[in-house]
Image (cartoon, helix red, strand yellow):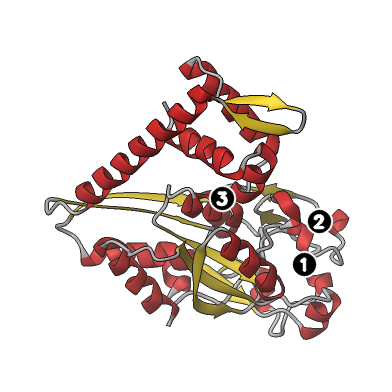
């Protein structure tokens, strides 16, 4: 039994169709249909009668939905009680790849050396973070939005009843190791300067509904850059590989405003890009770091303390 799958089925019941629920959950319709079939098979019931293009809840489906809702509410109540215990502090959060988030988490751990903690720290693209928060798999999420996509993101988050809070503005930069040849240019880097080096990027992961993840490290945001001239591009899912390649080779990437003490702690530098190069991108390259959570949700004590650390890192 997967609680996440039960939550998904409940959303189908609320929406009255798989397609509407998939849009609401921001996952693919085929994936949601597969989950519905798995749940029906696992519990050996028929939840819906398929009539033309409509789904009609069966009598067993109605009873099933009522039981699942009661169970989910019981589990949420249990989670709240568990999180309030004095001996162990629990919280979960999701974040897009960001040095700001990790720096804040390290500071949070430094401030709580003797505290018993159980923390679920999940990292993924913006879409995964939004889904985690919407499905309550994470108490809050950290996302980076390009300034041009903020209006569309506002509509999305509002439809999912998620609240966002601005943490800091992020200026577009080039990321390289200390001592990299580009750091010795004594001027901002031009496009031609980049073609001699390999890149490390997060893979393109467009989402359903026409809304795409567009943080600075995604290749497809910069169509004006001639990627065919780049000898090697490594796509990674996690920050460990991302930083290892940058720190130990001449591989470069795009990123944001430098972290405090990043040259000491990470052996990397954030280099300025020439205005002439930025102009060729024909888009707003700067972004903003946000915290998102469910509307009306009261953060647990450890989650609040972590966010205070993050705000301090961003200040």
Query: Mark 1 near mark 3, Cβ–Cβ under 8 Å?
Result: no
Query: Which residue is depicted at the point 79% across and 75% down?
Result: 283
Residue corresponding to mark 2: 230
Residue 182 percent across, percent down from the top left: 69, 72
Please identify the quarter of the rendering in which residue 183 is found: bottom right
Residue 229 to residue 153: above or below: above
Query: In this image, 249 relative to 265: left or right?
Result: right
Query: Which residue is depicted at the point 35% across and 62% down?
Result: 105
Using the numbered discs, state the Cα–Cα distance from disc 1 to disc 2 in whole angstroms: 8 Å
Asked which secondary structure carries label 3, the reply is helix
Residue corresponding to mark 3: 128
Mark 1 or mark 2, which has the lower sequence index? 1
Frontmost of labels 2 and 3 is 3
Query: Which residue is depicted at the point 33% across and 43% down?
Result: 73
Q: Camera-side residue: 213 or 187? A: 213
Query: Mark 2 near mark 3, Cβ–Cβ under 8 Å?
Result: no
Frontmost of labels 1 and 3 is 3
Query: Mark 1 near mark 2, Cβ–Cβ under 8 Å?
Result: yes
Query: In this image, 127 relative to 168: left or right?
Result: right
Which label was assigned to residue 194?
Answer: 1
Quarter holding the C terminus is bottom left
Asked which secondary structure carries label 1, the reply is helix
Which label was assigned to residue 206?
Answer: none
Mark 1 or mark 3, which has the lower sequence index? 3
Please identify the quarter of the rendering in which residue 213 is found: bottom right
Using the numbered discs, state the Cα–Cα distance from disc 2 to disc 3 in whole angstroms: 29 Å
Residue 21 percent across, percent down from the top left: 62, 44
Using the numbered discs, state the Cα–Cα distance from disc 1 to disc 3 in whole angstroms: 31 Å
Mark 2 or mark 3, which has the lower sequence index? 3
Q: Camera-side residue: 268 or 150? A: 150
Q: In this rendering, does residue 266 appear at all?
A: no
């Amino acid at each position: 039994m997967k609680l996440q799958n039960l939550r998904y089925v409940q959303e189908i019941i609320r929406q009255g169709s798989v397609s509407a629920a998939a849009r609401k959950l921001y996952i693919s319709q085929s994936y949601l249909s597969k989950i519905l079939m798995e749940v029906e098979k696992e519990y050996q019931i028929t939840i819906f009668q398929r009539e033309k293009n409509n789904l009609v809840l069966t009598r067993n489906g109605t009873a099933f939905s009522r039981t699942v809702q009661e169970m989910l509410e019981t589990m949420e109540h249990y989670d709240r009680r568990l999180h309030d215990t004095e001996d162990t502090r629990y919280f979960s959060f999701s974040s897009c790849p960001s040095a700001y988030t990790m720096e804040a988490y390290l500071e949070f751990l430094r401030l709580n050396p003797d505290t018993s903690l159980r923390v679920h720290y999940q990292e993924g693209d913006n879409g995964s973070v939004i889904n985690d928060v919407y499905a309550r798999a994470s108490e809050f999420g950290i996302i980076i939005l390009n300034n041009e996509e903020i209006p569309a993101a506002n509509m999305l988050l509002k439809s999912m009843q998620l609240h966002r809070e601005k943490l800091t503005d992020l200026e577009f930069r080039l990321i390289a190791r200390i001592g990299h040849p580009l750091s010795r240019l004594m001027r901002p880097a031009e496009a031609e300067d980049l073609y001699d080096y390999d890149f490390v990027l997060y893979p393109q992961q467009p989402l359903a509904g026409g809304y795409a993840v567009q943080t600075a490290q995604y290749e497809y945001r910069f169509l004006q850059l001639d990627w065919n001239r780049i000898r090697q591009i490594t796509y990674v899912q996690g920050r460990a590989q991302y930083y290892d390649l940058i720190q130990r080779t001449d591989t470069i990437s795009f990123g944001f405003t430098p972290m405090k003490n990043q040259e000491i702690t990470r052996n990397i530098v954030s280099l300025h890009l020439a205005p002439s190069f930025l102009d060729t991108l024909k888009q707003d390259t700067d972004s903003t770091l946000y915290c998102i959570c469910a509307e009306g949700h009261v953060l647990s004590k450890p989650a609040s303390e972590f966010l205070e650390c993050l705000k301090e890192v961003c200040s």
